[in-house]
Amino acid sequence: MCAMLAEPPAPAPIAAPAAAEPVVRVEALDHFYGEGVARNQVLFDNRIAISAGELVVMTGPSGAGKTTLLTLIGALRSVQAGRMEVLGHNLSRLPPHGLVEVRRNIGFIFQMHNLFDALSAYENVKMAMQLAHLPPKGMRQHGTEILDRLGLGHRVDYKPHLLSGGERQRVAIARALVNRPRLVLADEPTAALDRDSARKVVELLKEMTVEHDSAVIMVTHDYRIIESADRLVHMVDGRIVSDVVLHDALRICEFLRAVELFRALTPTQLTDVAEKMTKRKYAAGDTILRAGEPGEDFFLISDGEVDVIRADHEVARLGRGDFFGEVALISGEPRNATVQATEPVDTFVLGKADFQSAIEASAPFREQLYRVYFSRH
């Protein structure tokens, strides 16, 4: 684990939402630029929920709406249509002073560093601590430590005109993170940085999520960052078209590749299936499927074991990497067996419509699926 920064004096933040509540929740969000005949819609029905402790990387082509969405989340633009909750507050209902208080708990990193030329690197960082109403004691130590973490320990008293573009950007990053905000919004934070400097920034952002439970949303085209992300969100033409929990998607692909049923799928098809699966947990003794009910989901076991029961008799025990639920989806008939968890079970679940799409996408997959179906039926 990276070396930890000294604890700063505690600010007086706005009230935190309940632990289970997302840090950011976006529902049916639209946004427009211009008025009258010049009015142009740039965001369309976007929905996302981001929890504490997540590092979310947002990608997409230029003009996809990434920066617009980021500024709306940061309370820098007014919500026009839909719902936006940030740090437990509905932004559309907050008066101007309420929006200011929300922004005090957000760390902003923009492509333009916006440093004060008359202030040194440390003084730019210090101003952020003063705006958060931190007591003066300990400011110098904390401010210089975060600059040192970003490779600027020898530049703390330099003014911006004496710093390179990459160094100025790192000062701006230090200023955004010095108060350990509960939410960090970053727009191309590493674009002007070399490999070593970018690595230090990503390490610090990751530390924020792991050690301090901050949520980080980062717009970037820097492939070096993706491997540190928890989620990858892709936008096209004003819409979130993909929202992938990377750890889960990679694990699902590993499972699918090991299952004979899915070996006919190409890597692209496997990834498409993985992105559509959701995680579902069951306690020991839970009934996952019940005989006679309609089939709506396909299940892949991530951890744990289940019993397959027909006519009150166990006919199979399935464990990690096994799957069930496909028979009713193929036949259209009710479930022909009950499935119960014998211990805590983690599953990845694919809905009926997406399951049917996977069948249609690959003839070899379809053929292999029917072989499995007839062997089990």
Image (tube, rainbow, N blue to C red):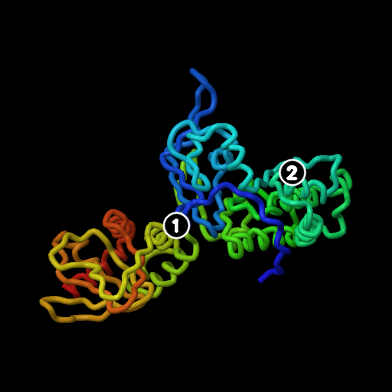
Q: How many marks?
A: 2
Q: Nearer the viewer, mark 1 or mark 2?
A: 1
Q: In the image, is residue 270 above or below residue 314? A: above
Mark sitting on residue 113:
2
Mark sitting on residue 20:
1
Nearer the observer, 8 or 79:
8
Nearer the observer, 242 or 216:
216
Q: On the rendered structure, is 189 left or right of 37?
A: right
Nearer the observer, 27 or 363:
27
Name the spot of residue 23 as percent of width and height, x first.
51, 51
Is residue 86 visible in the rendered structure shown here?
Answer: yes
Identify the amino acid type marked 1: Ala
Q: In the image, is residue 14 above or below residue 326? A: above
Q: On the rendered structure, is 177 left or right of 270?
A: right
Q: Residues within 10 Å of mark 2 (few under 14, many from 20)?
A: many
Q: In which quadrant will I find the C terminus?
A: bottom left
**Label 2 residue SS:** loop
Q: In which quadrant will I find the N terminus?
A: bottom right
**Residue drawn at the location 49% of the way across and 65% of the way down:** 247
